[in-house]
Structure formats: C-alpha cells, structure tokens
Amino acid sequence: MSDPLDDPINRKIWDMRIRARLPMAQVSEETGLSRSQVWRRLTTIVEAVPTLSPEEVTTYRRIEIANLEENEAVIQDALLACGQSDHLGISRLSNALLRVQKRRSSLLGLDAPKHVRVEGLVQDPVGVVLDRVRLGISAAEEHIVDAEIVEPDGLESEEATAESNRHETGTDGD
C-alpha cells in the first residue's frame, strides 16, 4: 500500500487541515472537493498514521480534539436552546453529542483495546503436569536405597506369633 500523502491532493488537504489548521469548509473550497470528500480523504490519511511521523500524529490529534470540543460546545448550546417538547431534536442532538464524545475518547486512547496480542511460550497443561511428575519420580529415585527388612533375633513378626498361637490352641481359624 502506498503512502496516501504521495497523492498531491491528499498532501494539500493534510497541509491545510492539519498543519495550517484551516477549517474544513476552507479546505473543501480550495481543493474543489466537497466536505465529505475531504473528510474521506483525511480519514484515509489518518488510517495510515503508523507511516506518519510522531509529530504529524500529535498535531492531528490536537487539532481533532480542539474541533471535537468546538462541536461539543455547539451541540450543548443547541440542546439548551432546544425546547423540551422537541423530542426529535433533543434525540438527534444527544446522539451527535455521544458520537463526538466517543470519537474524542478514541483519539485519546481511553477506550479498552480492541485487540490484545499475547506473546510467549504456550505449554500443554498435561505436558506440564507430566514433566513435574517425571521430576518428582527422578528426585524420589535418588533417595531409594536397596534394603531388606530383617527381624531382630528372638523377635517374631505379628503374623508368625499369631500363626504359632493358632497351632498351639488347635484352632485353624475356620
């Protein structure tokens, strides 16, 4: 995708609107484009913001926030002037005010991110558990000693004592 500022008309719009801070009506008149065409071209330029210098982005944001504040003031004045019985007018002005506030919030980065990028090592939970089990077994094997249980002389195990008692009394356990 080429840089939108390579187009001479887009560059003129950028210079007039962003750098010279001229009103949209004047930019429209001097470029011979309608206000909506100027706005669409300006939107295309702004969508290419990552290719613009940080200074240009900062300048654009400042200008747009100032314009949004002006628009908000005009809408609020119109809302105050609007009669309470003009429900349609109040509704339209309220919607316009919300759009201005939403745009300003977006420009200032106050909205939650739309996309979250997560990077890092992803492991299979079962694999993690198996790795831990293997480590545990390895650690336990280090402590195993070959041994044999030996009864001390003269002491018999409980089973041997119980068996001899059965034989002495003559009971088989049946």
Image (cartoon, rainbow, N blue to C red):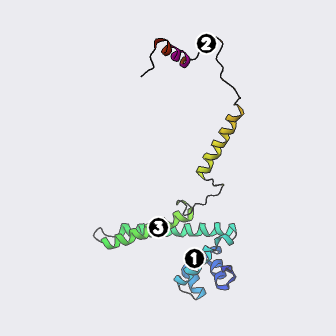
Chain-order first, disc 1 or disc 3: 1
| Residue projecting furthest to the front | 170
- Compared to residue 91, the image places residue 26 above or below, namely below
Q: Does the magenta stretch include residue 89?
A: no
Residue 90 horizontal/vertical position (percent): 35, 69
Residue nearer the viewer, 170 or 111: 170
* Residue at mark 3: 72
Residue nearer the viewer, 63 or 47: 47
Q: Which residue is drawn at 64% across and 82% down?
A: 10
Residue 43's tag is 1
Near mark 1 (Cα within 10 A), the count class, few <14, some 14-19 or many ≥20, is: few
Q: Which residue is drawn at 61% across and 53% down?
A: 124
Q: Which residue is drawn at 55% across and 61% down?
A: 113
Callout 3 amino acid = Glu
The residue mark sitting in front, 2 or 1, is: 2
Callout 1 amino acid = Thr
Q: Which structural element holds mark 3?
A: helix
Main secondary-structure element of the magenta-colored stretch: helix
Magenta region: which residues? 159-164
* Residue at mark 2: 155
The residue mark sitting in front, 3 or 2, is: 2
Residue 66 horizontal/vertical position (percent): 55, 67
Chain-order first, disc 3 or disc 2: 3
